[in-house]
């Protein structure tokens, strides 16, 4: 059977995917990943809008629901590379060059983004957290954490490692947030996150689980948002 792909970008993606599927040297997991990328409307939209990452849509959709990023607020973004969340946060809080209210950190280098500052560092190191506050020049109103450990493929190990990052981000927030502040973090459901959720219930007025449409259905990824920080 001939497979003509002569109309539109969708046709050409399909042709490309067929070619990739026939490549016997490629690992099945890698073929599946490429297939998902080619069929994913958010990937295309990310490029169109000039976002640094597809993850930008997750923050946009969570903010559509809770409307917590408003002009004038200060934001710290933990695990910010390549920078999609920084772009959305700076747009929403109207952060400007020269008076940046949005500061990010990542163990990897983040591209320069207008209205944001970013540093390279590991948030496990307390000095890195202190440096973020120093750069911001005030306590943050919002702490974001999309931090994820590199996945191993072993579900329980991945869950424990990501929950550890959630706990570090939460400790940082409890230490530093302004009263009434907001904490939003990636949270894999799997059991070990209970202690962190209990702490959130204790220190914040409201805690919600949220899975934005742009977070892939088959993924264990979810987010937790804690509103109304009561103070330490
Ligand atoms: C899913 S990506 C973040 C994507 C980002 N929200 C965006 O919109 O572009 C997770 C990031 O967490 C970072 N990360 C993981 N552990 C970290 C740590 N201990 N300290 C700082 N960043 C960390 C990773 O390097 C990775 O860039």
Image (spheres, rainbow, N blue to C red):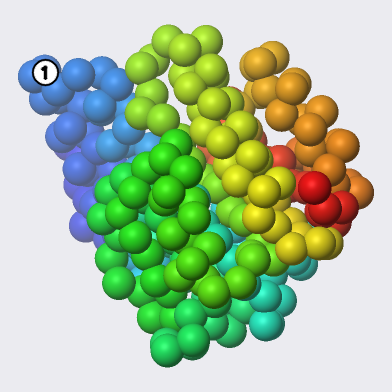
Q: Is mark 1 on a helix, strand or loop?
A: loop
The relative height of residue 150 versus residue 4 in the rendered view (above or below) is: above
Residue found at the very far left of the displayed protein: 25
Q: Where is residue 116 in the image (x, y as percent from the top left)?
A: 43, 74
Q: Where is residue 91 in the image (x, y as percent from the top left)?
A: 54, 78
The relative height of residue 203 versus residue 19 in the rendered view (above or below) is: below
**For mark 1, does the 10 Å Cα neighbourhood hold few (<14), some (14 to 19), or many (20 or more) residues?**
few
Which residue appears at 82% of the width and 53% of the height?
Answer: 231
Question: Does residue 75 appear to the left or right of 131 in the view shown?
Answer: right
Q: Mark 1 points at which residue?
A: 24
Closer-to-camera residue (12/37): 37
Which residue appears at 91% of the width and 49% of the height?
Answer: 205
Which quarter of the figure has residue 142? bottom right
The relative height of residue 69 versus residue 172 in the rendered view (above or below) is: below
Task: Indicate the quadrant containing the N terminus: top left, top right, bottom left or bottom right.
Answer: top left
Question: Does residue 47 appear to the left or right of 132 in the view shown?
Answer: left
Q: Position of residue 122 (x, y in %)?
A: 37, 42
């Amino acid at each position: 059977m001939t497979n003509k792909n002569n109309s539109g970008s969708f046709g050409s993606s399909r042709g490309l995917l067929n070619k990739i599927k026939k490549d016997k040297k490629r690992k099945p997991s890698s073929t599946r990943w490429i297939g998902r990328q080619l069929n994913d409307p958010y990937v295309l939209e990310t490029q169109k809008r000039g976002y640094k990452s597809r993850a930008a849509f997750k923050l946009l959709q969570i903010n559509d629901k809770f409307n917590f990023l408003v002009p004038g607020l200060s934001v710290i973004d933990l695990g910010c590379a390549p920078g999609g969340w920084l772009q959305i946060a700076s747009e929403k809080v109207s952060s400007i060059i020269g008076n940046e209210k949005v500061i990010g950190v990542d163990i990897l280098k983040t591209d320069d983004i207008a209205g944001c500052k970013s540093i390279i560092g590991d948030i496990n190191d307390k000095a890195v957290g202190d440096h973020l506050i120093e750069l911001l020049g005030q306590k943050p109103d919002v702490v974001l954490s999309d931090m994820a450990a590199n996945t191993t493929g072993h579900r329980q190990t991945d869950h424990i490692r990501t929950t550890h990052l959630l706990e570090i981000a939460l400790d940082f927030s409890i230490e530093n947030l302004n009263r009434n502040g907001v904490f939003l973090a990636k949270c894999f459901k799997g059991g070990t996150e209970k202690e962190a959720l209990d702490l959130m219930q204790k220190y914040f007025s409201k805690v919600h689980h949220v899975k934005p449409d742009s977070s892939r259905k088959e993924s264990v990824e979810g987010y937790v948002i804690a509103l109304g920080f009561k103070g330490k």
